[in-house]
Amino acid sequence: MDVGSQEDPVEMGQEEKEERVEKMSKMVLEIQSETISRDIEGLREDLGTREAEETEKIKKGERRVAENEAQMNLLRTRLAYLEHRAAEEEKKLKLMKGGEASGNQNRAVVETVEDKERRGRLTTWDSSTFLRKKPKMSHLPGHMKHSMDVVVELALDFTCPWSYIAFKRLMAALERLPKAYANKIGIISRPFLLNPEVPMEATRTASFHVTHAFGPAQAARFGRNGTLLNKQAEEMKLFLNKDRVISNTMMAHRLAAFGIEKHQATNTIESIFRANIEGGEDLNLISTLSACASVAGLHSKEVEHYLSTNEGVESVQASDHDIKSTGLTGIPAYFIWPTGYRNGRELPMGSFLNTAVSWPLFVHGNHEKELLVNLFRDAIEEIDPEIKNLLPLPVSDKVAENGQRPSFLLPRPSFLLK
């Protein structure tokens, strides 16, 4: 019994030591495990940061490569055009030196001079002269791109009476052009939202809007019949409804884009303008826009379904942001673009781009339709110089005294010839 009683304390002490050692080992292992986990997590974070940095570097490199490639393509295009022009000039020079008839020689010289004069006039409307940067060309539906030589983008807002006057003058200018010219010109609208911050459900009358924006004195001046706005409206036989509703025009611009895709661009634009500027209707109501669509020849049910969704919102916002980023601060404004096609056939690279004419042509503000007539004529002739030779001569005066084809288009304003 005495021996057993002496051995038990020794055995209990040994077990405690083993338990303590085991606990200490577990604690050490846990600490080591936590340390290793933290180290791994830190390494993962460092790896993720480095991967993000390397990815960003790669993206920047890709963007630079794309920009350089775009610049190279532009240079190739200009080089191709210059080579084409050099070949044409060489042909004319050989024709003049080859003993051809004097009449043909003089005709070649006159054509060359006309080309230079035309390009000199078009340079007057170089968009880079007036804007910080050039806008991007709006998306063109296939039917318009392939059938038109030139597209006129009218930057506008549908509650702006100046924009309505500009649109009516644009249509009047097309009517003054010969059909051979007018049929080559497409018309589309370009969103320039004057009140994008106004909530969709908010409305105000035009008189209240002017008073709130410019003050009572300026509003009273705008309201007089003798103002320039009212005079120009009277000249175009337009009625300006002073009680028309001013609201957010996002839905109206979406309808205009819908009409452009459905071959009803000008009808849709005009019906929206008339509903608000003359009729005073709220362009933020689907019922109003559905009626506009019906007048323009669109299916009202299809339009109502389209407007009840968010389709086209991002496109209008992007177009509005792009046009304002150019430095344009007011409307109306015209942008004249070549479509890249002539008589339904795609033009070869460089055939409508050159160092003298910078597209798009840019015209800001309201101008007389005669100026637009001459500008459109120059733009069409720049892309299709042979169009003058294809037009039928007037029956009453086919041959002038000097043997040249008579000019049946309106004369250019004198300041364009300087």
Image (spheres, helix red, strand yellow):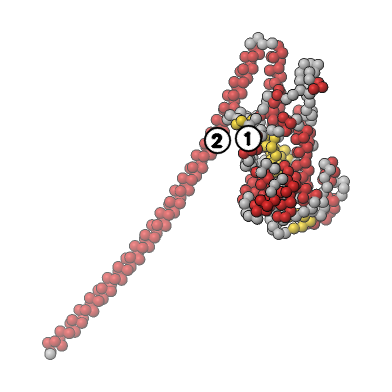
Q: Amino acid at mark 1?
A: His
Can residue 210 be seen at all in this image of the molecule?
A: no
Q: Position of residue 379 (x, y in %)?
A: 69, 31
Q: Characterize the local packing of mark 2: few (<14), some (14-19) or many (20 or more) Cα atoms within 10 angstroms.
A: few
Q: Characterize the local packing of mark 1: few (<14), some (14-19) or many (20 or more) Cα atoms within 10 angstroms.
A: some
- Nearest the camera: 245 or 26? 245
Q: Quadrant of residue 99?
A: top right
Q: Position of residue 254 (x, y in %)?
A: 67, 49
Q: Which residue is mark 1?
A: 146
What element does badge 1 sit on? helix
Say which mark, if any, is on residue 364.
none
Instruction: Say which residue appears at 71% left-offset and 27% top-offset.
Output: 118
Q: Position of residue 261 (x, y in %)?
A: 65, 43
Q: In this rendering, is residue 3 above or below 340?
A: below
Q: Which residue is mark 2?
A: 71
Instruction: Say which residue appears at 80% left-offset and 49% top-offset.
Output: 278
Quarter that holds the C terminus: top right
Q: In this rendering, is residue 104 above or below 16?
A: above
Give the mark nearest the N terminus, 1 or 2.
Answer: 2
Q: Amino acid at mark 2?
A: Gln
- For the image, the number of numbered tags is 2
Instruction: Say which residue appears at 43% left-offset and 51% top-offset.
Output: 51
- Nearest the camera: 356 or 3? 356
Can residue 82 be seen at all in this image of the molecule?
A: yes
Q: In this rendering, is residue 257 above or below 3?
A: above
Q: Quadrant of residue 143?
A: top right
Instruction: Say which residue appears at 66% left-offset and 11% top-offset.
Output: 100
Q: Position of residue 326 (x, y in %)?
A: 65, 43
